[in-house]
Structure formats: structure tokens, C-alpha cells
Image (cartoon, rainbow, N blue to C red):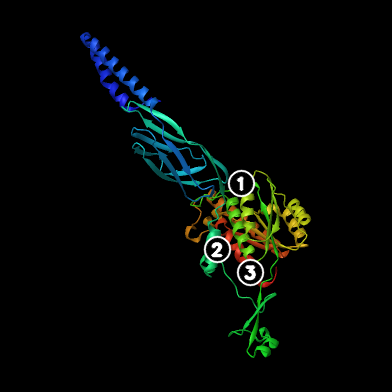
């Protein structure tokens, strides 16, 4: 318990009286009487406060929360006593959470209950714990504040933000993928696998007509084809130090690694819907391996295995990751390497991609810093004002020249490449995957 402002304000006249008693000693007896009265009142109020029955408190929060998104937490408080309670409530949320709507004040009548709601926004993935609810209870006369810890703690898991996956699922159901930015391209000619027979439609080629079925049913029947299923998409996910980079200057606050996880989840969902199997190997620090599997529950498996995975301070060893992939992945697959590539990686990256290409189709998806695009925005371009500005501009263009040359060399080896800002990685990966599917490369 600690003194309230009311007690401090009540002591103010007593202090003023003490100052006056120094000038007029006759007030000394009054000063002592006032002190005795205040002490007795404060003591009686403290005893009453300690005897007050604490309210009951409970918390309702989802066991899994998406990274960077606002979620609601509900606090329920019940007054089981026969006295009205004045409370100020605060929740001990995890340190890695932003909050809105706390603290809150309320008055609970005898036998009544109240529900408080506030918002939390997780800033870091992994396991996090809520502590007990903290309530400041006013004493009956308001001279003291009793600090209470109510209820029990609770653990929650913060997952990569799967809002994009849910949005994709909704738009896929409505056949409106173009609203998400995913481009479904029409296949040139026929698919790779026979799907079904159907009635002839205007626009079908003559090669699609099944003449035996047409003669039997006496109406034009066409064969319908679909993309080949039962393929494998395997992710090589870089957990190295470059993936710890954050987007500045108006970015969304997510690291390159968080954007990479979101992209992996979205492409995994799309590939599973296409009938392909999905697997993953992380490298450069925390190594995790998920064998390629099919079916929708595979996405839940990915979420549960990767929600607490994070970037480390290690340097990526692409060649070691490629060797392990060749051992663990005997079937030809689309291997998607998600990383943040520099031109100095050529010594290990190029041999690793060559090794993977012996058996697999390789797609290198590299995250490009958003600040580079902002620095080269024509709207913001102006002549350097001094020598240092000229050096910075020259160094930036030289760095980008080396970066383009490195990607040109990789494309010359037959490697599929993507070099995009983090916010565009997910949709770019999905579009490239669908393009490879419709072209028959996988």
C-alpha cells in the first residue's frame, strides 16, 4: 500500500499549521491535535483497506497472435464483496508488445462485474507471457492505494503475420486473384496432365477435341488439362545477419526475415492448393528441416515450426546448405533460396546454385533494401551539393552496378532470380511460381 494524493493534500494544512506554530507557539497544541487526528484516520483507513476483499480478474486473449497486427485483449473483473470498489486497472503485457487503451479506471458496485478491452500489437515473434492483472484499489476514505496482482499469467505465441494468406484464400474462393496482384496467365497450348472430359466450348483448339467421345455421344467433347501436380517446392531460408535488417524511412517496421517468412507462408499456401508438396531448410544459425509434405495441415505445421525462428548474427554458408539439400532432397524440386545477396557472395553462392541445378530447378529470391530505391527515386534526384554528396551518389551507383552484374552472372548460369524490396517479395514469389507452373518448368 502507498499514500494517495488525498492523504498528501490532507497533510498540507497540518504543515501550514506547523509553520504558523513556529511564529505563534500557542498553536503548538492545535498542531499536535491535528497530527493525532490525521494519524488515527489514516491508520483506520489503512486497516479497512487491508480488510477489503480483492476483486476477481480474468483475461481472454487468443493463444496465437499475428506479428505487427493489432489484436484485442479482454479483462473481466468481478466484485464479490459488499462494498463498492474504485479501481485503476493495468495489465502486465509482454515487453515486446505495443498497447492502446491502458490503464483504465472504473467503479465496481457490490456483486457487479465489468469487462475492459484494450489492443496489443506484437513486435517480435516467439513465445511471450502475460503477467497478472495489476489493479490499484482505493481505500474506503481514499487515503491509501492498495496495489493488487490479480489472476494468473498466460503464455501466447506470436506467429508471422498470416493475414496475407487469409486474404489470398478469400480472393481465391471468389476467383479474384488479380485484386491481390497475383497474375494467373493462360497456358500456351495444353496442360501437362489430363484432367477431365467436358463439352466443347468456343475457343477450344481442335487438338483438344476427343473424337472417340464425340462420336460416342454425338456432340463435341473436349479434353481439359491442368498443371502437373505432385511436384515439390523446397525453401532454403537464410537466417544470417543480413536478414536482421529493418526497413527505415516509413517502412512497416518488419525485418527482412519477417518479410521472408510471410513470403514463404503465402507461397506454401499457393503451392499446397496447386497439389504440390512443400518443405524447408533453414541455414546460417538455427537449422530446421521440414520434409516436403502435401495437404492443407502442412501450412499449420510450417507455422508451428517457424513462428519462433529468427535471424542470427552468423554469416550464410550457401554451399553447405546446398550440400545438405542434395542429400535430403532426392526428388527433383523447385528450390527457392530466400536471402539477401551481395556481390561478395559469388565465391560460395554460385557454386551452391550450380550444385543444386544438377537435380533441381533453382529460384534465388533476394531482398533489396528499400532505401536503395528511395535514393534513386527520380523525383528526389538533385545534383550533389558538395564533394561528400557526390561520393555517396557515386558509391551507390557503383554498388548497384556490381549487384546487377552479380545477378546477370547468375541468370547466365540458368538460375531463376528475383531482386525485390521486402514488401514485394511475397507476391513476386507467387507470380514467378505460377509462371513456372504454367510454362511447364516444374
The vertical placement of 209 against 244, above or below, is: below
N-terminal-most mark, 3 or 1: 1
Query: Is disc 3 in contact with disc 2, using a CB cutoff of under 8 Å?
Result: no
Nearer the observer: mark 1 or 2; the answer is 2
Query: How far is mark 3 from mark 1, CA to CA?
Result: 32 Å
Q: Quadrant of residue 359?
A: bottom right
Does 318 sit above or below residue 20?
A: below
Q: Which numbered mark, 3 or 1, is in the foreground of this view?
A: 1
Q: Give the Cα distance between marks 3 and 2.
A: 19 Å
Mark sitting earlier along the chain (3/2): 2
Q: Secondary structure at mark 3?
A: helix
Q: Which residue does the image show at 61% across and 75% down from the upper left?
A: 186
Q: Which mark identifies residue 308?
A: 1
Disc 3 residue crowd, few under 14, some 14–19, many 20+, Cα 10 Å: some
Callout 1 secondary element: loop
Which residue is drawn at the image coordinates 42% and 30% (left, top)?
147
411 with respect to 327 (left or right): left
Q: Is residue 111 or residue 298 the one in the foreground?
A: 111
**Numbered label tally:** 3
**With respect to residue 1, does 369 lie above or below?**
below
- Residue 343 rendering spot, x and y as whole percentages: 67, 54
On the image, numbered disc 2 is attached to which residue?
A: 169
User: Residue 181 is drawn in which quadrant?
Assistant: bottom right
- Crowd band around label 2 with a 10 angstrom C-alpha radius: few (<14), some (14–19), many (20+): some
Q: Which quadrant would residue 41 be assigned to in this image?
A: top left
Sequence-earlier tag: 1 or 2: 2
Q: Position of residue 417 (x, y in %)?
A: 66, 62
Instruction: Please rate how many residues cluster around mark 1, counting C-alpha atoms within 10 Å: few if below 14, some from 14 to 19, many from 20.
Output: some
What number is the disc on residue 435? 3
- Return the x and y of residue 128 as percentages of the image width and height: 55, 42
Residue at figure coordinates x 72%, y 62% from the top left? 333
In the picture, which quadrant includes the C terminus? bottom right
Amino acid at each position: 500500500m502507498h499514500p494517495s494524493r488525498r492523504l498528501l493534500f490532507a497533510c498540507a494544512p497540518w504543515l501550514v499549521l506547523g509553520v504558523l506554530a513556529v511564529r505563534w507557539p500557542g498553536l503548538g497544541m492545535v498542531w499536535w491535535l491535528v497530527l493525532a487526528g490525521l494519524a488515527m484516520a489514516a491508520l483506520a483507513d489503512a486497516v479497512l483497506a487491508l480488510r477489503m476483499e480483492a476483486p476477481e480478474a480474468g483475461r481472454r486473449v487468443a493463444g496465437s497472435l499475428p506479428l505487427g497486427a493489432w489484436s484485442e485483449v479482454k479483462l473481466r473483473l468481478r466484485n464479490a464483496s459488499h462494498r463498492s470498489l474504485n479501481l485503476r486497472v493495468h495489465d502486465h503485457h509482454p515487453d515486446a508488445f505495443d498497447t492502446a487503451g491502458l490503464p483504465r479506471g472504473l467503479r465496481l458496485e457490490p456483486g457487479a462485474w465489468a469487462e475492459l478491452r484494450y489492443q496489443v500489437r506484437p513486435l517480435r515473434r516467439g513465445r511471450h507471457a502475460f503477467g497478472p492483472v495489476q489493479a490499484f484499489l482505493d481505500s474506503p476514505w481514499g487515503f491509501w492505494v492498495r496495489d493488487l496482482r490479480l489472476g494468473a499469467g498466460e503464455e501466447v505465441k506470436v506467429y508471422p503475420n498470416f493475414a496475407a494468406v487469409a486474404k489470398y484464400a478469400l480472393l481465391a474462393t471468389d476467383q479474384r486473384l488479380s485484386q491481390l496482384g497475383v497474375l494467373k496467365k493462360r497456358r500456351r497450348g495444353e496442360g501437362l496432365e489430363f484432367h477431365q472430359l467436358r463439352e466443347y466450348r468456343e475457343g477450344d483448339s481442335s487438338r483438344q477435341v476427343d473424337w472417340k467421345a464425340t462420336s460416342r455421344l454425338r456432340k463435341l467433347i473436349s479434353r481439359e488439362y491442368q498443371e502437373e501436380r505432385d511436384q515439390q517446392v523446397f525453401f532454403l531460408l537464410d537466417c544470417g545477419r543480413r536478414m536482421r535488417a529493418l526497413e527505415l524511412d516509413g517502412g512497416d517496421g518488419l525485418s527482412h526475415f519477417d518479410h521472408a517468412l510471410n513470403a514463404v507462408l503465402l507461397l506454401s499456401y499457393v503451392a499446397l492448393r496447386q497439389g504440390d508438396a512443400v518443405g524447408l531448410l533453414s541455414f546460417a544459425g538455427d537449422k530446421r528441416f521440414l520434409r516436403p509434405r502435401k495437404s492443407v495441415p502442412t501450412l499449420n505445421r510450417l507455422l508451428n515450426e517457424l513462428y519462433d525462428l529468427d535471424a542470427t548474427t552468423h554469416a550464410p554458408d550457401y554451399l553447405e546448405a546446398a550440400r545438405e539439400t542434395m542429400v535430403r532432397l532426392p526428388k527433383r524440386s523447385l528450390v527457392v533460396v530466400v536471402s539477401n545477396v551481395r556481390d561478395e557472395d559469388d565465391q560460395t553462392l554460385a557454386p551452391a546454385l550450380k550444385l543444386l541445378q544438377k537435380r533441381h530447378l533453382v529460384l534465388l529470391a533476394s531482398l533489396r533494401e528499400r532505401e536503395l530505391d528511395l535514393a534513386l527515386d527520380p523525383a528526389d534526384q538533385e545534383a550533389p551539393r558538395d564533394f561528400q554528396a557526390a561520393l555517396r551518389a557515386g558509391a551507390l551507383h557503383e554498388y548497384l552496378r556490381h549487384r546487377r552484374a552479380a545477378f546477370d552472372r547468375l541468370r547466365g548460369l540458368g538460375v531463376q532470380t528475383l531482386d525485390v524490396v521486402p514488401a514485394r517479395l511475397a507476391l513476386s514469389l507467387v507470380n514467378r511460381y505460377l509462371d513456372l507452373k504454367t510454362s511447364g518448368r516444374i
